Image: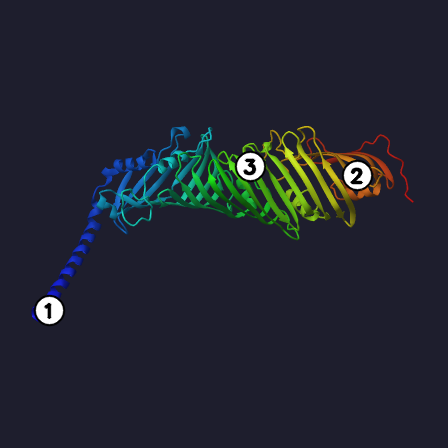
Amino acid sequence: MSEYNAQPKRSLRRRVAIAVGLVALVLLAIFIMPMINVGRYRLRVAQGISDAIGRPVHIDNITLTMLPTPGLTLENFVVSEDPEFGAEPVMRANQVHVTLRLSSLWRRRLEASSISLTEPSVNIVRAENGHWNLQSLLMHASQVDAAPTAQPKAGSAPRFPYIEATSARVNLKLGHEKTPFSLTDAEFALWLPNPDEWRLRMEAHPARTDTDASDTGLLRIEGSLKHADSFSHLPIDLHGVWTKAQLGETSKLMTGSDAGLRGTLEWGANVTGTFAESNVQTWIKIEDLRRAEFFPPHTLSMEMRCGLRANNRFLTLEDVKCNAPVDGGNIALSGRIRDVREPDEAEMQVGLHQLPASTLLDWLRVASSRLSPLWNATGNLDAGLTYNQAEGWQGKLTANHLGLSAQNQAVIMDQTIELTQATPTPVLFRRLPGSRREPQGLESYAFSFEKLPLDLGAKNPALAHGHFDGHLKLVQILGEADSARTRTLASMTPVHDQIDTLLPKEGETQLNLTCEHTANSTAITCNNNAPTPARPTHRK
């Protein structure tokens, strides 16, 4: 019996001894391994990374760490740029930590399970020929044979590491010029779930360096990229959403100055296809919209959803179709943009169906602070308008029982307005040539109309001509008018006092009314230049 009991005791002592030995070896490795000079492998590690990504890599120093897992810490990690895109590095990070896969040592190679970059700065560059600096990086990576990131055992192909970045900054350059646009506080992750598919995820805050824009919301992008023979045919499946963006700060971000708008913006898009041709489903939602200087009785909200086909690396937008239900009515937009860099060359069709006039007036108040808050509107509008650069805007606008009122006075309209334009200029909306101002809503665009019929109570309608470019430039009304009805319309304008002095107290009169800005002034001057005013008449 004694020999039988001694066997388990010796086995137990052996297991305890082995465990103690392993612990001793681990402790010894923890204290001794950091003393090993791995700096002499700096050039070899840099060359290995360079071969993997296809760009020269520079590392100042390498240190070995054992806790919490074995790994390498790379200091001053720099990825050089292709000379075609400039001399500034593609990426710079003060510190990069590489976690090693111990199981790969059995195959006599070193694999990284994860690569963590701390506060890296990344430059995304678009050259004048339309190429991007990341194209060659993606194509080079697609040609490297790699196993999935989560594969448990080492195989013939090295496993792709889980790459992540924290507190990153992404800068945008066009040619050799760095733009003020960037993404800050970015969190990024890239991994390989399948041998031919990358998955990516990013969260970041949009920023603009030449403004103090701060509350610009959060941009989230996630999706997948697959292998292909060329960058244009690289399959993509991307989903992005931009949330919690404040409109005042967003206008600073987009234009460089505050457009005087308040509210929140949400924009999202789903993109499937390739960089050469893809289908895009996108939406934009605006909530609690108002001007900064006043609080209206109710704020505005709208959501528009669009579908389109993007070609030529997203420079050409085809089959654009958008729809926005608004207060019981509907706004539809369709068209084509040949080149997003030349928006004036777009072809568009706009349709309005029973759009409440009160809603349109509310939106116009947001677009311009010059519209009086005392105005009210009833009725609705239908419209079918087309635009192209050669002919400008054409189509029809129908007012259905349109009522306009101010200070208890009202005007009712039931008529169709036809917009026609035979010459390229003036156009309905266009950027002012040579203007140095950034877009400020509708006030940075020109608007012209000709032969607009106005029912001023006379036998025949008067005709209006006008031009706006940031503010009222010129409005001219020709024809016969009833004085009382004309005063009612004028009461809704900031020049009603001037027009009141130009009209007889009652009856019909001849109008050749011109209102325009005087030179070097913001004041509006009105004159009635009718050659022979009609003699006032009294209606029985």
Answer left or right for 46 relative to 246. Answer: left
10 Å crowding of disc 3: few (<14), some (14-19), many (20+): some
Q: CA distance from mark 3 to mark 1?
A: 86 Å
Under mark 3, the amino acid is: Glu
Which residue position is annotated with label 1?
Answer: 5
Asked whether residue 80 appears in the rendered view, the answer is yes
Residue 74 x %, y %: 30, 41
- Viewer-side residue, 53 vs 157: 157
Q: CA distance from mark 1 to mark 2?
A: 119 Å
Q: Quadrant of residue 333?
A: top right
Under mark 1, the amino acid is: Asn
Q: Earlier in the sequence, mark 1 or mark 2?
A: 1
Q: Quadrant of residue 352?
A: top right
Residue 516 x %, y %: 73, 34
Q: Earlier in the sequence, mark 2 or mark 3?
A: 3
Determine which of the numbered discs, if any, sits on residue 318 in the image: 3
Residue 100 x %, y %: 27, 46
For the C terminus, give its image quadrant. Answer: top right
